Amino acid sequence: MTRVNWLDLQVVDLEKQSRFYQQLLGFEVLQQTDARVELGSQGSKLLGLQSGAKSPADPRQAGLYHAAWLFPRRADLGAWLRHSRELGIRLDGASDHGVSEAFYLNDPEGNGIEIYWDKPREEWPFNAGKLAMVTDPLDLDSLLQAAEGYSWDGFPPGGELGHLHFQSPRVEETAAFFESLGFEPTQDDYPGARFLSMDGYHHHVAVNHWRARNPKSQDSAGLLRYSLTVDKPKAELLDPLGLTCLLG
């Protein structure tokens, strides 16, 4: 089964970033050294943090647009919303995409984050047989009502890294790399972006050119590597963004 397994970020302040993700998403520390922290849930790695960056992520550079954390139930997302308010977390956006409901924010070093749940597939919007994701306002009151009686107890069982969204000045080249791994376009009429998936999912990866203008600096915070499970032999590849893609 196709899935996005985990990602590694290069960070400026390892302790601050580790604490942020533990508080925000309820991740557990799986391994820790002076230069690296492995975070995850129920013993499985989801996020690696590695020291070495000298400056925060630059929104104009190619690399990660956001890492998207998928919760299994709508109640989980509503409980997380209450949790984020209790923490005083600043959210940058909230949208109903037809296929999902999602929140957007940045970590302290400028890495994009999406937190979402998927609607049942039979409710996904299609137009002339093609997926037709939208960006509509999210009904926060309804979401909170769905979470009544539920509490936030950390990263929910069944949660996962749902997809990775990249940014690049060369969208077609980056999309072609993922197509070479077996991903297929799911929606190619969304302005400035391509969405790709396997197994009929709305997207496992996406790439846009909305703000990326420059290649990523080695010294800035951001994505270093990521792991995908696809129907390919294990391999270590370099993608068009200069990032390490691990298959297997």
Image (spheres, grey):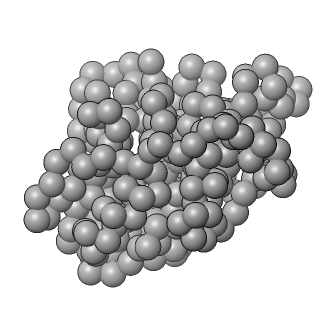
Q: Name the side, left or right, on which 78 lies relative to 125.
A: left
Task: Decide which of 191, 20 is in the foreground and name it.
Answer: 20
The residue closer to the viewer here, 181 or 164, is 164
Residue appearing at x 84%, y 29% in the figure: 126
At x 58% / y 31%, what residue is drawn? 72
Residue 110 percent across, percent down from the top left: 47, 72
Please tell me which residue is depicted at 67% across the width and 45% down the height of the picture. Answer: 78
Vertical placement of 237 versus 215: above or below? Answer: above
For this rendering, which residue is in front, 12 or 1? 12
Q: Percent position (x, y) of residue 149? A: 67, 37
> Measured from the top left, where is residue 231 in percent x and y?
39, 19
The image quadrant where one finds the N terminus is top left
Instruction: Answer with the quarter of the image where residue 137 lies.
Output: bottom right
Residue 113 visible (yes or no): yes
Look at the image and tell me in which quarter the C terminus lies: top left
Is 141 displayed left or right of 61 in the figure? Answer: right
Specify the farthest residue to the right.
128
* Quarter assignment of residue 42: top left
Question: Is residue 244 visible to us here?
Answer: no
- Label count reads 0
